[in-house]
Image: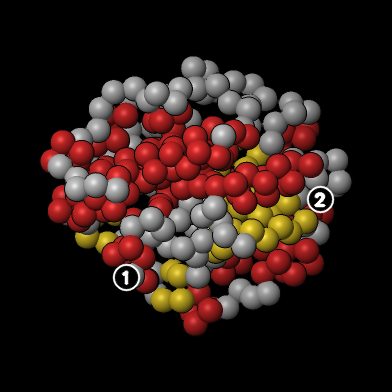
Amino acid sequence: MEEKLKSLCTEIRCDVVRSIGHLGTGHVGGCLSVVELLAVLYFSEMHIDPANPKLPGRDRLICSKGHAGPAVYATLARRGYFDRSLLMTLNQGGTNLPSHCDMNRTPGIDMTTGSLGQGFSCAVGAALGSKLEDDGATIFTLIGDGESQEGQIWEAAMFAGAKHLDNLIGFTDSNKLQIDGPVEAVNSIAPLAQKWRAFGWHAIEVENGNDVMQVRAAVRLAKKNRGSGKPTMVILNTKKGCGVSFVEDLGPGNHNMPFSQADAKRALTQLLGREATDEDLEIGGESEWK
């Protein structure tokens, strides 16, 4: 399973850089930092059915940091929700794959997100609804560390703790950077784990959130907390732009950046471990991982 998941992460990263490279600009850094989590959830841990995206009682992922949409799309395509060739329509006129997640356009997207903080509140509401329905679903949600400066995050956190939503598992993409600079310098959120515990949550810290097996172990530990009366927040220490060194090196500059076909080819050369060709820039066909 470890090698399969690692290979899958590489393929998802390749499709992210292909789609953003075709568009010419995008949120490269924050997409690449969450790939391991997405691979683990959609290919190992979530109760879902790509052939029936509205399956009652299904697990859901609400990506509150909606600008990571291209990484979610690449994962959904690999999982079989839609043809991979659609990834090349990212954020273009008439697309079903807008820059930020849209539940009205994209199969497999369970909540429209983008205004930071709001998706997390929606996830809390979904977890409450699932509790009332007693449908057995687990609601997963992904937030950013810069997003965690939003007051709405902590209002929702307080409510989830008070309502004992132990069917809710959150993930913080703690890549230490936001559009204006280092999170610590803009508005520090430390000590993060202690804050979540103070709001009535379990908190799990993952030393390397870009190690797929560390992430998988943390997800499984979080799932065991169901029945405890507490939601769980998994803090993933990640690297913004992970897997592509020249993107990593840009720091805050990789948040929403120009990304040409030449950049995509350079990134693919690194990810594939060989000199990338023009043909490597193309996407097409169904995923073998369905």
- In the rendered image, residue 146, in percent from the top left (x then y), is placed at 51, 67
Q: For the point 16% across and 50% down, which residue is it? A: 261
CB-based contact (under 8 Å), mark 2 and mark 1: no
The reply to whether residue 120 is in sight is no
Which comes before the other along the chain, label 2 or label 1?
2
Residue type marked 2: Lys
Query: Can you say whether 32 is above or below 284 in the image?
Result: below
Q: For the point 39% across and 43% down, which residue is it? A: 10
User: Which dot marks residue 226?
Assistant: none
Q: Nearer the viewer, residue 61 or 212?
A: 212
Q: Which quadrant would the N terminus be assigned to in this image?
A: top right
- In the rendered image, residue 213, in percent from the top left (x then y), is placed at 60, 47
- In the rendered image, residue 41, in percent from the top left (x then y), is placed at 57, 38
Name the element at disc 1: loop
According to the image, label 2 marks what residue? 230
Query: Can you say whether 222 is above or below 210 in the image?
Result: above
Residue type marked 1: Leu
Q: Quadrant of residue 284?
A: top left
Name the element at disc 2: loop
According to the image, label 1 marks what residue? 250
In this image, 158 relative to 207: left or right? right
Query: Can you say whether 83 is above or below 265 in the image?
Result: above
Q: For the point 21% across and 54% down, which residue is it? A: 266
- Outermost residue, right side: 228
Q: Residues within 10 Å of mark 1 (few under 14, many from 20)?
A: some
The reply to whether residue 134 is in sight is yes
Q: Nearer the viewer, residue 144 or 213?
A: 213
In this image, 171 relative to 87: left or right? right
Q: Which quadrant would the C terminus be assigned to in this image?
A: top left
- In the rendered image, residue 206, in percent from the top left (x then y), is placed at 64, 59
Q: CA distance from mark 2 to mark 1?
A: 38 Å
Q: Nearer the viewer, mark 2 or mark 1?
A: 1
